[in-house]
Amino acid sequence: MNAPRAPVARRPLPGVLFHHKPHGLSSNDALQKAKWLLRAEKAGHTGTLDPLATGVLPLCFGAATKFSQLHLDADKTYEAVALLGTKTSTGDAEGEVIAQRPVNVTDAQIAEVTRQFTGRLRQVPPMHSALKKDGKALYEYARAGIDVERTPRDIEIFELNVALALSVHGDVAINIRAKCSKGTYIRTLGEDIGEALGCGAHLSALRRTATGNFDLSHCVTLDALEAMTESERLACLLPVESLLPDHIRVTLDAGNSGRFLSGVRRRGHWPDAQQVAVYGEEPHALLGTAHIKAGELIPGRLLSPPEIQQILESGGTSPGTPRQALASII
């Protein structure tokens, strides 16, 4: 009889892992596997990718989950292949074929749809999405054969490249590369372009190549992570502050740090700013985010003293020193 396996000892691991999600795996499954490999207590992903999609999936651990919304809001870049002439029930290769039309597309039409779909647009979210209607995900209605009215959403396509190609099976396809705002559905973009070309389309492949300032070069696969030693896995984690690349920095002395961590506004000679990363002077530690208005530093997302301690210790500081120094600001 086999002895029961000892439970995995979890730890409050602060940091960000940029994962290259493979085809066929859900975002949550990828998160849970990485969480298990890193023995992390708390984790969350930013910006769900469909199982059929691949590419950049930021995974946040510990204190980093406080700032995961920043990557949900970040601009994204995608590469997709859309097969022309066939529409499906889901807008991708998983759905049933619901319409087929002949394909007669010219380079002039491709140039026109590229212009037409660049810039600010109104996009109707697809039924096969996780958006909620009366507390229920749209895909649940879709599976029950119910079509619900959806409110168009404002999105922006900052850069768009559309090119004619042939699929591996010889079908006429278009390659799409789009840099877009949050909330953009590339499946819907592919379908809308197909309609504008007069033949319909559905996505056969989708890859997210960048989110915010991070791209595939920053990513690690689960297979690679699994083959690493524990110290190598930890080295793949980026610091929590990597989620705040566009934030200006404000550093506070010990007294003001303590008050800021209590949610109290601080006054200073700072220019107005919407995105501010606030640090303590001694020890030099990330305290949270804020914005500045009329010389007031207004707290946003704040880290707790234990989370600050975990960040200090994960940065290689000896466990005793930061704890003693942290006591001066809390």
Image (spheres, helix red, strand yellow):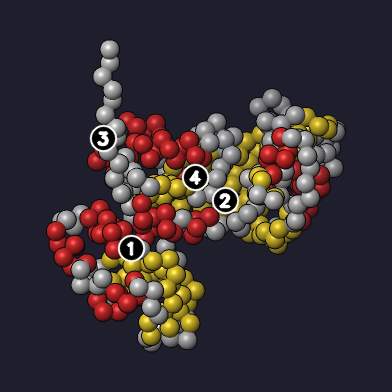
If you read the primary sequence from the N terminus, does the residue marked by circle 2 or circle 1 appear first? 2
Q: Please, is residue 283 above or below residue 149 in the view?
A: below
Q: Amino acid at mark 1?
A: Ser
Please indicate whether residue 111 sits to the left or right of residue 205 in the image: right
Give the residue at mark 4: 56
If you read the primary sequence from the N terminus, does the residue marked by circle 2 or circle 4 appear first? 4
Q: Which mark is residue 229?
A: 3
**Which class describes the residues within 10 Å of circle 1: few (<14), some (14-19), or many (20+)?**
some
**Which class describes the residues within 10 Å of circle 4: few (<14), some (14-19), or many (20+)?**
many
Q: CA distance from mark 2 to mark 4?
A: 10 Å
**Which class describes the residues within 10 Å of circle 3: few (<14), some (14-19), or many (20+)?**
few
Q: Which mark is residue 304?
A: 1
Q: Which mark is residue 77?
A: 2
The N terminus, quarter of image: top left
At 78% across and 53% down in the image, what residue appears?
Answer: 112
Secondary structure state at the residue bearing disc 2:
strand
**Residues at marks 1 and 4 touching, judged by CB atoms closer than 8 Å:** no
